[in-house]
Structure formats: structure tokens, C-alpha cells
Image (cartoon, grey):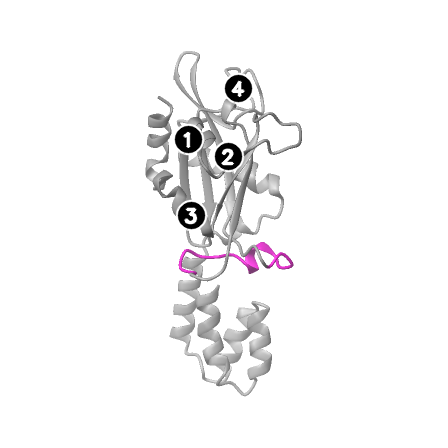
């Protein structure tokens, strides 16, 4: 958002309706700003098309970030998205191979009755200091260098899965971290005992601006996610 915002602010400062346009930019009413700038001759149609195309490319995952329900985002969308990318995986929800429902999300059948249990979690890269704004108004692209985000992956149960896929959604990119259950349990940022009375069975892990580099060794490109899951399940 910041890249487009700065471009439009520069043009709005030249407008006779400067105050109104700056207000519209803060409200992210960009279509109004586009039309007003073109009407004043401050924005050519070619430049408008360029700005819009670049914005759409930087924000192709914004519709996902807009999903407001934590369950619809973190469970339904994340699981369905992984299954669409890797049809070798199967949902654990309604499968006879899965005896304990709700313990992990998807699985891979290596052989008859032999499965790899996979947990899938997703988080948004949004400004954690602007809670009064909708997700899409405080979302970061990978080009944004300022601002702080915090993805809290909750209800992690390393005893119940073999491998975890953590997905971080930026406006322009989805990033993937793949950890074995042992790597999850032993990671210095994994906090066991998420709930009072918990004996280490369930925990949480944060990936945020300050510790992003601590997860670098676990990050993989999308095309290598399934391959990495199989390697870490050995």
C-alpha cells in the first residue's frame, strides 16, 4: 500500500483539491483520487494504467488477507489452498485412515496404512500496532521495510503431527516454512503450554519482524514444499 500511497501523495500535493485528495488517500479511496487527478491533468491515462497494474501485482493476495474470520482464514482457506497446490495430500477430516479427528489437518499416504501427518497453519503480515483498522488497510507487501508484524501460530501439537507447514501471507507473496515436529518442539521461539494446565501438549510459535531471520533455514519455495515435507517426515 505504501508505494502507491507515496506516488499519489506526490501528485495530490500539486492538486487544487489537495486536502480532499490527501484525505481520500488515507481512506484508501484510490479510484476517486485517480479520477480527480486525471480530471486536473495531473495523471495521464498511461500512468494510471501503470499504477493500477503495479498495485494489483503487489496486492494479488489481498483478498485472502481480507478474510475476517480466524477459522475461515487459518483453517478453511489454508488447508484448501495447500490441498489445491499438492493433490498428493489428503484432508484428514473425513478419511477412514484418520482415527483421531482434529489432531492434524492433512496427510500423505506413503503406503497402506502408513501416513505422514501434516499440520497446516497460516498467518497474515499486517501492522500489529494498528488494531483499529481492517486487515487489508494495514497489510504489508514484501517490499515494505517499515512497520511491525506478528504471526502467532496457535494450537501447535508436535506430538500429533510429523511435519508442520506454516504459511505467511503478504499482499504480494505467500511464504512457507516447513518444520518437522522435533524442529518445532525444539525451536527457541516455540512456547509449550499455551493454555493453563497444559503439560506441554499444545503450544504456539510467533514469526514476527524481530525474529524472521531465525526461521530462514526453514523457509522453502512453494514448488519445494511437498518435497520438503517428505524429507522431514523420515
Q: Quadrant of the C terminus?
A: top left
Tell me which numbered mark, 2 or 1, is placed earlier along the sequence. 2
What residue is pinned by disc 1? 183
Tell me which numbered mark, 3 or 1, is placed earlier along the sequence. 1
Q: What secondary structure is found at the residue carrying circle 1?
A: helix
Cα distance, mark 2 to mark 1?
Answer: 21 Å
Q: What secondary structure is found at the residue carrying circle 2?
A: helix
Cα distance, mark 3 to mark 1?
Answer: 16 Å
What residue is pinned by disc 2? 79
Cα distance, mark 2 to mark 4?
Answer: 15 Å
Contact (CB < 8 A) between labels 4 and 1? no
Contact (CB < 8 A) between labels 2 and 1? no
Q: Residue at x 45, y 68 (%)?
A: 4
Q: Residue furthest right?
A: 196
Cα distance, mark 2 to mark 3?
Answer: 23 Å
2 vs 1, front mark: 1
Tell me which numbered mark, 2 or 3, is placed earlier along the sequence. 2
Q: Return the mark for residue 212.
A: 3
Q: Residue furthest bottom?
A: 16
Which quarter of the picture shows residue 138? bottom right
Contact (CB < 8 A) between labels 2 and 4? no
How packed is label 4: few (under 14 Cα within 10 Å), some, or many (20 or more)? Answer: few
Contact (CB < 8 A) between labels 3 and 4? no
> Is residue 162 shown in magenta?
no
Tell me which numbered mark, 4 or 1, is placed earlier along the sequence. 4
2 vs 3, front mark: 3
Q: Which residues are magenta?
A: 130-144
Cα distance, mark 4 to mark 1?
Answer: 27 Å
Q: Is residue 97 above or below residue 124?
A: above
What residue is pinned by disc 4? 95
> Is residue 141 shown in magenta?
yes
Amino acid at each position: 500500500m505504501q508505494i502507491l500511497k507515496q506516488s499519489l501523495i506526490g501528485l495530490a500535493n500539486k492538486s487544487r483539491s489537495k486536502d480532499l485528495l490527501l484525505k481520500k488517500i488515507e481512506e484508501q479511496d484510490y479510484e476517486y483520487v485517480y479520477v480527480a487527478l486525471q480530471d486536473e491533468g495531473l495523471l495521464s491515462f498511461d500512468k494510471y494504467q501503470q499504477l493500477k497494474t503495479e498495485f494489483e501485482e503487489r496486492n494479488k493476495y489481498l483478498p485472502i488477507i481480507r478474510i475476517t474470520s480466524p477459522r475461515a482464514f487459518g483453517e478453511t482457506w489454508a488447508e484448501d489452498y495447500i490441498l489445491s497446490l499438492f493433490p498428493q495430500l489428503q484432508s484428514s477430516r473425513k478419511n477412514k485412515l484418520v482415527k483421531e479427528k482434529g489432531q492434524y489437518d492433512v496427510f500423505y499416504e506413503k503406503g497402506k496404512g502408513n501416513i505422514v501427518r501434516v499440520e497446516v497453519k497460516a498467518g497474515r503480515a499486517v501492522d500489529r500496532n494498528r488494531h483499529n483498522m481492517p486487515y487489508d488497510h494495514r497489510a504489508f507487501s514484501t517490499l515494505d521495510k517499515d512497520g511491525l508484524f506478528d504471526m502467532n501460530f496457535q494450537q501447535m501439537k508436535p506430538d500429533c503431527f510429523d511435519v508442520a507447514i506454516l504459511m505467511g501471507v503478504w499482499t504480494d507473496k505467500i511464504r512457507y516454512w516447513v518444520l518437522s515436529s522435533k524442529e518445532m518442539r525444539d525451536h527457541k521461539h516455540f512456547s509449550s503450554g499455551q493454555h493453563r494446565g497444559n503439560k506441554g501438549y499444545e503450544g504456539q510459535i510467533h514469526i514476527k519482524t524481530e525474529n524472521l531471520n531465525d526461521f530462514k533455514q526453514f523457509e522453502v519455495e512453494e514448488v519445494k514444499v511437498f518435497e520438503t515435507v517428505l524429507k522431514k517426515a523420515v
